[in-house]
């Protein structure tokens, strides 16, 4: 009886996958196609079925850091040739690599490649070299944070990482924006950046700081800078997206 249940469950999965394939034909690997594959930002359960199928089907995976991608592949129990391609990879080497393969997937360390990580450069070079680019969408930290912010998101301004030097321009942009604004910040600089932002924003401006989204210590801080900074001072380890309400 147990076997019967397992068999019918398996059949159900196979049926739904084949229906999916009929609809999307996503497993057809065309020549000179680069698949930009989103991967989880913490919780590996957030990988999509299509991402896994694509990673399994391509000839090679270009990735930001092979150690990171190896962890992902071993969790899902498959292997694939990996080639590291990061922000310091020489342009000519990237072009040469493109000539060696027919179907390539690119993954960054986490989230959607190209969103504040090196994926964008590869896409630009591949377009120039006549490649077809196919998105395999999934998680992005900025979208996850916006979706729980409670601020208007019909329009928003994403500013990437706060620059190390010359923050004034970005602080002014945040101060003057009518739209919801979001930016990325690292564990080492989150408090310093928020302290600096306090000098620019009116004290009542609502903020959301999303820490370690989808991970074990996920925490969402809501309030004004005056309220949030002391909370972060108790625990500021992790990865952060800052969302600021428009003025
Ligand atoms: N391409 C990625 C994406 O689509 O989310 C972003 C890459 S960027 C190099 C990494 C930054 O994203 C981190 O420094 C942090 O600001 C943010 N981030 C990534 N994972 C996060 C998470 N789980 N929780 C909060 N922020 C995260």
Image (cartoon, helix red, strand yellow):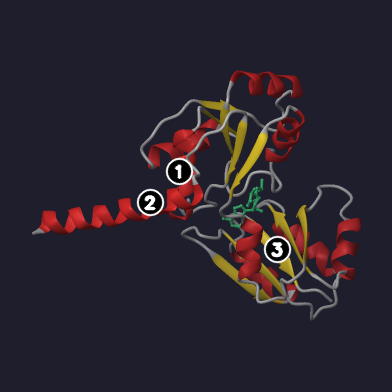
Q: Is residue 203 visible?
A: yes
Which residue is pictured at 68% across the width and 18% down the height?
96
* Closer-to-camera residue (26/164): 26
Which element type, helix, strand or loop, lies under badge 1? helix
Q: CA distance from mark 3 to mark 1?
A: 30 Å
Question: What is the residue that sits farthest to the bottom in this orientation?
Answer: 204
Q: Nearer the viewer, mark 2 or mark 1?
A: 2
Question: According to the image, label 1 marks what residue?
Answer: 52
Residue 44 can be seen in this image: no
* Percent x, y of residue 163: 81, 49
- Judge the density around disc 2: few (<14), some (14-19), many (≥20) Cα neighbours within 10 Å: some
Lower sequence index among marks 3 and 1 = 1
Q: Is residue 163 left or right of residue 51?
A: right
**Pointer 2 residue:** 17
Identify whether 35 is placed above or below 150: above
* Residue annotated with mark 3: 242
Q: Say which quadrant the N terminus sits in.
A: bottom left
Whether residue 194 sits left or right of residue 165 in the image: it is left
Name the element at disc 3. Answer: strand
The residue lying at 71 percent from left, 60 percent from top is 191
Q: Are marks 2 and 3 in contact (CB under 8 Å)?
A: no
Residue displayed at 75% across by 20% down = 92
Of tags 2 and 3, the one toward the viewer is 2
User: x and y percent of residue 180 in the render?
Assistant: 77, 70
Q: Is residue 167 above or below residue 131?
A: below
Residue at the location (90% across, 63% down)?
A: 172
How far from the left and from the top, in percent, is residue 157? 79, 63
Mark 2 vs ligand 1: CB below 8 Å:
no
């Amino acid at each position: 009886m147990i076997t019967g249940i397992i068999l019918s469950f398996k059949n159900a999965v196979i049926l739904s996958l084949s229906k999916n394939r009929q609809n999307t034909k996503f497993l057809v690997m065309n020549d000179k196609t680069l698949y930009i594959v989103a991967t989880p930002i913490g919780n590996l359960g957030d990988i999509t079925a299509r991402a896994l199928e694509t990673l399994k089907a391509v000839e090679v995976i270009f990735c930001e850091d092979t150690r990171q991608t190896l962890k992902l592949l071993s969790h899902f129990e498959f292997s694939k040739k990996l080639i590291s391609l990061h922000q310091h990879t020489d342009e000519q080497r990237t072009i040469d690599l493109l000539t060696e393969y027919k179907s390539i997937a690119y993954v960054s360390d986490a989230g959607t490649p190209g969103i504040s990580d090196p994926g964008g450069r590869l896409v630009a070079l591949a377009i120039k070299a006549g490649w077809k680019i196919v998105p395999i969408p999934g998680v992005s930290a900025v979208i996850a944070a916006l979706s729980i912010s409670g601020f208007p998101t019909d329009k928003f301004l994403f500013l990437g990482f706060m620059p190390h030097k010359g923050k004034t321009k970005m602080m002014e942009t945040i101060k003057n924006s009518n739209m919801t604004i979001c930016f990325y910040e690292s564990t080492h600089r989150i408090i310093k950046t928020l302290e600096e932002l306090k000098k620019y924003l009116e004290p009542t401006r609502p903020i959301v700081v999303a820490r370690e989204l989808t991970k074990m210590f996920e925490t969402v801080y809501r309030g004004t800078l005056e309220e949030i900074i002391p909370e972060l001072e108790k625990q500021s380890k992790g990865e952060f997206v800052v969302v600021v309400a428009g003025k």
